Structures are given as structure tokens and as C-alpha cells.
Image: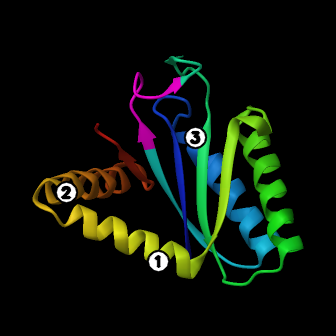
Amino acid sequence: MNLTVVTTLEGSLDRTGRERAAAAVRGVYREVLGERTLVLWRLVPTGSAFTANRPSEVAMAWITTSIRDGIEPARREAGLHALARAWAASTGTTDDQVMIALVDSSFFRRFLAATREQMSRPRGTAFMARLLGRALSSYARQRQLITTIDF
């Protein structure tokens, strides 16, 4: 199974909105890319994101998802467009309020390994412990994997 990480501004989508958006992402992934994905939410605290040098108020999202290595360019492009449309339709935003990256799974694994290595340092260990604790806690409460990033 592949992994999709959705990073968005805290409060921009409530639980129902996140469920609807995750279902849309999984549906496009299954229909267009022919695979399954697990959706992980990362929520950026209000006041930590900026647009045009001001605190961001838009429901901008950054979707990073792993895909099978070597997927055909036409299929990759179709997936990008379908994800943008599905995100806009399921969240009530526009497709220019989402940034999507379909990343080959081999590169995604290297990226995650580098992140793990960075987090293995003493300060990173505490950060990862908090991140994991919050994700597990949110899953126990809401059946969604959600983390909040502290800067």
C-alpha cells in the first residue's frame, strides 16, 4: 500500500471535511492509478503558514503521495489533474489551492529514510515521539491519522 501525506492549515477542514477529502483522494488513487493508499494528515498550526507575507487563511493543501516507480507520464498527469479536481470538489476550494506531488515510491522511501535519520538525533527523537503520540491519539479518537506540527 502506498502513502499519501496531506499537509493543510489547522482548522481549514473539520473531521467530516477530512473524511470526505481522504475518500476523494483514495477514490482517485484507486480509479486512475489502480492502487490503494493510506492518507495521513499533517495539520500546520494557525499562524505558522504565510501567503503574501501575511498569515495564511486559505485552505491550501500540499498532497504528497507515493506511486509505483516508472508509471507512464500520461497516467501520472491524469492522476495529478484528477487529484486536483477531486480535492477542489470535496473541500469546496479551487484546484489552484492545492499542490500535488506524485513521487516514485523508491524516491519516497529514500526521503522517508532521510527524515527518519534526521529525527534520530536527540532533538528529533523527542519531536518524533510527540508526532507519533499525536497520530496514534487522533486515530484512537477519530479513526484518522492526524498530526500537528510544532515549530
Q: Position of residue 2 (x, y in %)?
A: 57, 75
Q: Which residue is mark 3?
A: 16
* Range of residues picked out in magenta: 43-50
Tell me: 97 left or right of 122. Answer: right
- Where disc 3 sits, the SS reads helix
- Where disc 2 sits, the SS reads helix
Verify CB contact (< 8 Å) between mark 1 and mark 2: no
Dividing the image into 4 quarters, which one contains the C terminus?
top left
Q: Quadrant of residue 91?
A: top right
Q: Position of residue 32 (x, y in %)?
A: 82, 70
Q: Which residue is mark 2?
A: 124
- Residue furthest out toward the top: 54
- Where disc 1 sits, the SS reads helix
Looking at the image, tell me whether mark 2 or mark 3 is earlier in sequence order: 3
Q: CA distance from mark 1 to mark 3?
A: 30 Å
Q: Position of residue 120 (x, y in %)?
A: 19, 67
Q: Is residue 1 visible?
A: no
Q: Which residue is mark 1?
A: 109
